[in-house]
Amino acid sequence: MLHVGFPAILNPELLSVMPEGIELIPLGDGLDHPIDIDVWIPDPYSTRALRVWPYLRGVRLVLSLMAGTEWIPATVGPHVTICNARGAHNISTAELTLTMILAMLKYVPLYADIQRSGDWRRRSEASQLYQQLTHDQRTYHPPVKLEELTGKTVLIVGHGSIGQEIERLLGPFRVEIIRVARTPRSHPLVHSVTELDDLLPRADVIVLILPLTAESTGLMGAHQFAQMRQGALLVNVARGGVVQTDALVEALNSGRIRAALDVTDPEPLPSDHPLWHCPNLFITPHIGGSSPQFDARSLQVAAGELRRYMQGEPLHNVVQAAT
Ligand SMILES: NC(=O)c1ccc[n+]([C@@H]2O[C@H](COP(=O)([O-])OP(=O)(O)OC[C@H]3O[C@@H](n4cnc5c(N)ncnc54)[C@H](OP(=O)(O)O)[C@@H]3O)[C@@H](O)[C@H]2O)c1
């Protein structure tokens, strides 16, 4: 009988998707004694999971409910197999990405501010913002107060599970898509990340949706921001560490680019951090995976992986194979 530990906070009804032949062991946040389990489903909040880990004995497989698993290898060591919940957060993260792109091109943060100030006449600020960002000094009548996504070029860095869903949602906007991943391929054309610097000047919107690894840490820095078009939009829904924060603060303050960040480095962002005061920036506090469907979808992915594990079949979402 396989012992599977799961966060006690989860709705037990959702665990009905788990295969038969296992014993499900709820792991409460206040766990204070050693416990034997074979498979660990950690709490999605790493701080709570890290409180439980010291009491776990015999773990051979970790089934994360998250797509990003960067804290787990250093915690559990190399002799444990780790799988992520690839696919479970596609819809929520891709929808947030589309929301951020449209919100920035439609100046929603400015209009939310205008709503709070109760001053309709401030709408003229949108025309100034458009001119500052795009350096487009042509006379428009009536003046520009919003931009369009349709027809723009969107560069997606990371063409995995979520990157492909973002491309699917962008479909109706008839944008040109440029794809980048670790490994280049065709049908559809996906460029190697080694070409990134050359591709950046072609894009109006750059979406980061790749894992944080040794290779991707600091991928976007001062040199990359300098390659971006004047006023181009950087959307980071990956991990904060993919972007060099100091260089981003500088690029935003100089008025060169705009950004929407669901993730930051550091996280949580301290209240005195300069990012809070940068212009042309929209920040959400790492909510890309948030959805009422989160538990059910993630557990469905974990259950599929567990079934394969029990039947000795290859696992689909291995991010670390046990040595
Ligand atoms: N904001 C949020 O709340 C939130 C929610 C979910 C996920 N995420 C983040 O999104 C990441 C991606 O999730 P996913 O499910 O789409 O993962 P995935 O299916 O594994 O896809 C990852 C993609 O990134 C590419 N990649 C990996 N390393 C790269 C590098 N150094 N340079 C360029 N591309 C690289 C991969 O290239 P290949 O195809 O060539 O392997 C692949 O296309 C997660 O790791 C997580 O950090 C954030």
Image (cartoon, grey):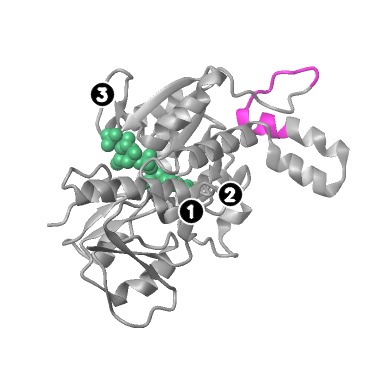
Question: Measured from the top left, where is residue 292 in percent x and y?
Answer: 56, 49
In this rendering, is residue 201 above or below 288? Answer: above
* Mark 3 to mark 2 CA distance (whole Å): 33 Å
Query: Which quarter of the picture shows residue 201?
Result: top left
The answer to whether one can see residue 213 in this image is yes
In this rendering, is residue 23 above or below 292? Answer: below
Residue denoted by label 2: 283
Question: Measured from the top left, where is residue 266 in percent x and y?
Answer: 46, 60
Apparent side of residue 204 relative to residue 106 in the rendered image (left or right): left
Tell whether label 3 touches label 1 (CB within 8 Å).
no
Residue denoted by label 1: 264
Residue toward you, 196 or 156: 156
Apparent side of residue 189 relative to residue 270 in the rendered image (left or right): left
Q: Which residues are magenta?
A: 128-142
Q: Amino acid at mark 3?
A: Arg
Residue 236 among those drawn in magenta = no
Tell whether label 1 touches label 2 (CB within 8 Å).
yes
Seen from this angle, which residue lies furthest left?
A: 323
Residue denoted by label 3: 185
Q: Under 8 Å from ligand 1: the CB of mark 3? A: yes
Question: Measured from the top left, where is residue 65 in percent x and y?
Answer: 39, 53
Q: Which quadrant of the figure shows ligand 1?
A: top left
Mark 3 vs mark 2, foreground winner is 3
Question: Measured from the top left, where is residue 243 in percent x and y?
Answer: 42, 47
Seen from this angle, which residue lies furthest bottom?
A: 33
